Image (tube, coloured by chain):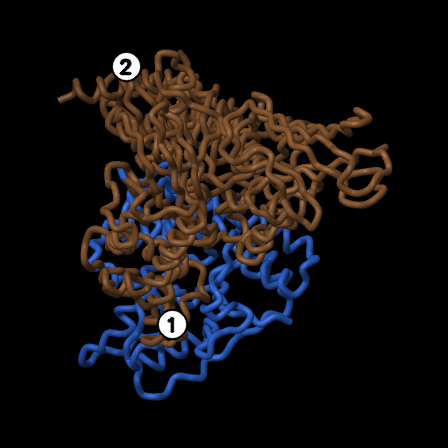
Amino acid sequence: MIDKPAPKKRKSKAPPGPLEENDRPTVNPPFDIEAFARAATAPPASGEELNTTLPPPPNLDGEARSQRPTLTNEVELEAARARSAQPPDPAGRLPSGMLAIANLRSPSALPPSVPSSTSPPSGATPSPSNIEAAVLGAIQGSAPAPEITERTIEDPVAEMRERASLGDYTGALEMAELILAADPASLEAAECVENCRSVLENMYAARLGPSSGVPVVVVPQAQMQWLSIDHRAGFVLSLIDGFSTLEMIIDVSGMQKLDALRILHALVQQRIVSFKS
Amino acid sequence: MEKVIGIDLGTTNSCVAIVENGVPTVIPNRGGYKTTPSMVAITEAGKRLVGHIAKRQAITNAENTVYAAKRLIGRKWSSPQVKNSVATSSYRISQGPHNDVRIVLRDKEYSVPEVSAMVLQEMKLIAEDYLGEPASKAVITVPAYFNDNQRQATKDAGEIAGLDVIRIINEPTAAALSYGFGKNVEKMVAVYDFGGGTFDISILEIGSSGVFKVIATAGDTFLGGEDVDARVIDWLVQGFRDEHGIDLRQDRMALQRLKDAAEKAKCELSSVRETEINLPFIISSGRNEALHLQRTIDRKTLEDLSADLIERTVDICRQTLSDARLDKDEIQEVILVGGMTRMPKIQLAVAEFFERDPCKGVHPDESVALGAAIQGSALIDDKHDMVLLDVTPHALGIMTQGGFFEELIPQNTTVPTHRTKIFTTSRDNQTAVKIVVMQGESERADANELLGEFILTGLRRAAKGIVEIEVTFEINADGIVSVHAKDLETAKEQSIDVTASSGLTRDEIKDMLDNAKDYMVERRTTEEFEAAKQEAEKLVGEIERLLPQVEQIVAASDFGRDAIEKARSIVAKARQAVTRRDAGAVKAEIEGLSRTHRMFKGVVAKTP
């Protein structure tokens, strides 16, 4: 049995679709979540009956679920990972993108200082159902939030297969690495690691553009220390000198290619880095 | 006339120069730097990195990054310097099949000349990019103390890199050549060379006929600017530990950044009095909070941190002058070489010791390569009035009774040459003598380098000291040493030819040469593909940017719809060619892409 470091909320077993949309299994419910959330948390008008439980009916106007934008993506996940590693916010303040946290996973290759997926941090990643309860508890502010506990995975190999089949390559990679840590001879896990890495590398590489592109730091030096990035991203940032190409930076980073690509992509998404035109 | 490049193959940095229209010039590399780190790395993906790019990942990929290969070149596995390197290097050093040294990178074994060849190949490429034509002839510099094996190993490295090494010259000689270029000097000079990894002091006599004679040379092969960097790193690490209780040395990424920042600060402090070291997000704390390192270092601190290192260089200078029985006032000029000599404190220490201001007329990083280029130019230019002579870098002789070394050919003797001496037997009724051929300057044989040995038998039985044996040393124009021993009474003789060896066989060198050629072909192909890919991707991007506008324009008219389909097809074909990494196909598609791009631009421009 392997402890699952960062459980995810499994919505449905939708068939894998195009990579961009389906690399995360999380999909929006077929209604406007934002409007629903506002309605759910807004104070009731006088004389109006409180409507808290039922979501609006699904909008079945023909738009395929896979074509909708997903709530989470790799960038949000990176941010969520960073947030989850930080001390909890003061009571009453909700982190943005709570559903993203419900789907967060630890990165596939963590630095030693970051709690590894096999030894979850003390404020361990909560299970989806508990998160929802905790959120509700925090919103209501009346009762203390229920204790957040880890969820365990009974069959990691099945979990790995499932994640891979759902197109959740990051999650599948994480599971495969856990399996390999326990059983280095597992051919299936090794193959899964290779496949997932390849897919994810291609995905990030495609998003970042040509390997000959030259990244530049767009945040002024004086403002650098106010950014919300970790030391690994800080290291990658230090390699960006305005002359070195993307390929060179990946070569000199000394990291696994996937990790370097993921960090660079996150830096681009956070508008800390852009590419010379 | 073919140009000869001069290469300063340094321990930490290398430099390539050429004489153009009579002017010695250093050739910058692709990054615009005039020196290139003598570092080679193999990435996890098996890619070879040489120069600055290798240096930038030297700590994060320490096991697979070779630096200071020069400390190992041509040395035997059993030598103390190799033992020292094995103990201090982050990469793996193993014993080769001929008692030579091998370096293991990503489970593949490389000989030291092979690694040095990778650096030389890079220097050759830099020269070729600049000249726009192949550069095959080279003069390479080596430290004055290098023995024949080390020189031969450097030559072999040149050969593996595809260079015809027409001469190996001493680094101080090259610096002096650069100093004396265009002047008619006749002086006794000291060359104080404090580089990144080694320190050397050499005393040279520059003769009027263009003869550069090394009178004395000494140094420390494990003392250089990197030691100063290490002191700055220690200072930064200690300060951070005091403040945050975290040891930055535990994190390779942090250490890599510290190394780069320490070197940068050291260089800056040669021209400014203080500088700031700012390393945001250097490490994450236990609470996963990113911490920043921000400190100001001033020149005084740097001088205090490196005071003992500077003092060590002065001690070596003192000892060298003493060994050469020279007084300070006999030195007429002090030439500063090596990046560390930019440090004001070092200039002051040298001036105080030699009691004269050092010459600042030569470039500390470039003078050695420039000198090599000057010599290269002189070697192929008959009109040049400089006389350049090959000399023996070390004395040659044999071992005699009691473990002493008897010199036959002194150091710095011009070759070709030959010398003869008569020896006698050392025991009564001795019928055989062992001739042990050695190279070096020590009176003790065991402190010198063994070149070879042979036995002369059949001597007449007689009391010791009666039988006379004539020993002749001969060095031909190719540097091959022959030693003959002859019983003067019976005329019986034995001989041996001593050729310098890098520790590699001819077959091994040939294989390495073939591998290096294959690598170059692969590299050129990759570069060709990358250039084509870049151009194709740029055009595809432009076409895709214009496509919606063109589609709109075309939709409003009856013409041009097939053009859009054609454009899509060309773009798709180009993408497929890029995916296949087929340089030829990508190049073939570029023409179509260019045409499409021009057409789209024209359509958009003509539409109001």
Reading the image, the residue beneath label 2 is B559
Chain B: colour as depicted: brown
Q: Quadrant of the N terminus of chain A?
A: bottom right
B163 or B146, nearer to the observer: B146
A48 or B7, nearer to the observer: B7
Task: Label 1, secondary structure: give it.
Answer: loop
Reading the image, the residue beneath label 1 is B285
The residue type indicated by label 2 comes to Phe
Query: Does A210 sit above or below residue B598?
Result: below
Task: Label 2, secondary structure: give it.
Answer: loop
Chain A: colour as depicted: blue
**Earlier sequence position, callout 1 versus callout 2:** 1
Report crowding for label 2: few under 14, some 14 to 19, many 20 or more residues within 10 A (C-alpha). few
Callout 2: chain: B
* Residue B517 in sight from this viewpoint: yes
Residue at (24, 47) in percent of width and height: B356
Mark 1 or 2: in front is 1
Residue at (28, 77) in percent of width and height: A93
The residue type indicated by label 1 comes to Ser
